[in-house]
Amino acid sequence: MTIHCPSRREIFESCITRGLLLSTIPLSQPQLLSAWQEGEAKAALPTPKDVLGPFFKKGAPNQRMLHPAGSPGFPLRVTGKVTNTRGEKVPGAKIEIWQADHAGIYDLEGFRYRAGLITTETSDYALETILPGHYDDRPAQHIHYLISAPGHRTLVTQAYFATDPFFEGNPDKTFAKMAKSRDLVRTVTLIEAPGIPRAAITFDICLEKS
Amino acid sequence: MAIDRKIPSDSEVREVAFTSDGVALAGACQDRKVRVWDLAKGTIRQTLELEKGDRVGALPTGSDVLATLTREGQIKTWNLQTGKVGIRMPGATPETSDLAISPDRRFLVSSNGTASNGSEEMVRIWETDGRQRASMPAGIGGTATFAISPDNSIVVASSYDANVRAWSARNGELLGLIEELPVAMFAMAFSPNGQTLATAGANRIVYLWDTGTWKLLRKFAPHEEMISSLAFSPDGKSILTGGFNVITVKHPVDVVLHETSTGKILRTETGAHRVGSVAFAPDGKMAAFADGQKSVSLLKL
């Protein structure tokens, strides 16, 4: 027996015909459908992928503070949440994070500037670190992410900083020098916490269902 | 100790390989030319000018063959003696991260990501007529390097996710999975008898694995720098490694000759910040390394 699974268009048309979806907007049905689908697609776009790079290390601890107390570098807070392309929250997702220190060096002996976080019940995560340093091979500041969750495709990506001198104050134009997508270059907010200025970025992650 | 001899090059040399007769040395250069030098005279015997968009995929010692890749995934092989293109095959898309050719030149191995947004990697084994023999899931994030056993029976890939996978070259069956490494291995080589696989990479340690059980046999003391290239001598008794350092292009690195059985350091030389490849001459009396300079360094052994 074949079960017919109605398309989004068929559901939309059926809802309009049956009075389940009302519209006060003076648009034709195809225009409404297209606006609806566009809106849905935008909300559900997966986070673009980027390269893994050579310096991933297994077994990073679940630690919110990535840098040792008193270490040099400009303090940075990163917050975000993990959702999927259906708009669902993904609690319990594993987020592997690693970055270079202020001098552009990755810790391959220990786990400085590395963490393996698990998203909370509300699918959030947060960490305290410093702005990563620059190094010759990949001269833009970046934080590496490897995100996995049951029922979802594993994503490898990177967060970049719109304020990085490498982007010349105009990441709309220059992002492709390093980042795989403009969406990965994040706006930096200066916050006071506590008593000293620090940078903050939001990096929300949207996974694809597998 | 000093480098015994340098062969000058008009362009920076990234990778080197000896020809099967041991009388010539091929160098893949920054200007997208592969130069083949006569070792005795130091003169150029052959220059292969890669076609637009080509990049070097594999330049193994002793095979007299170079394999290149186009952005579209097309694979080509070139004869180092004649300079002519041998095989052209479509390959796979999207962009191939690494390529290898078997010692008997009867198959090639490529590694590709997925066309969609996922970060899963696939390794494929290709017949020389372009048919795909097998395809295998190969972890997350891409392949750092391949090794193929001297008898052409095993393909090994080192993934940037820090796992090493070994497959049957005949049908792609998974033979071994090494999960105990903390970081990615950038260089790998089989011993000449095929019984040992040497791996080395981001944590500066050379590891030796039993290719029957895929268990660790032993590891050497850590180097000063990370390791980007590695080769066994033809008699298997020594291993040459080349280092790299990403922090500054001016940071010198070690090129180290080890005794395989003990890890003892027999000789140390200095390379520039990244040693792209190290190679032994087929008779084992000489080794060469390329470190991105306008010369190839030769060591008499």
Image (cartoon, coloured by chain):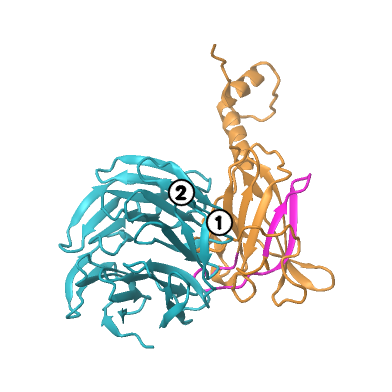
Chain colours: A orange, B cyan
Q: Seen from this angle, which residue lies furthest bottom?
A: B1
In the rendered structure, the residue with mark 1 lies on which chain?
A
Nearer to us in this view, A190 or B69: B69
Identified at 58% across, 20% down, the residue is A6
Q: Seen from this angle, which residue lies furthest top?
A: A1
Please name the residue that numbered disc 1 is placed on. Answer: A182
Label 2 neighbour load within 10 Å: few <14, some 14-19, many 20+? many
* Left or right: A121, with B96 as reference point: right
Disc 2 to disc 1: CB gap under 8 Å: no
Residue B12 in view of the camera: no
Q: CA distance from mark 2 to mark 1?
A: 21 Å
Label tally: 2
Residue A31: x percent and y percent?
Answer: 57, 30
Please name the residue that numbered disc 2 is placed on. Answer: B113
Question: In this picture, which residue range is highlighted in magenta?
Answer: A114-142
From the viewer's perspective, is residue B100 above or below residue B47?
A: above
Identified at 76% across, 77% down, the residue is A70
Identified at 70% across, 42% down, the residue is A90
Name the element at disc 2: loop
Residue A206: x percent and y percent?
Answer: 64, 46
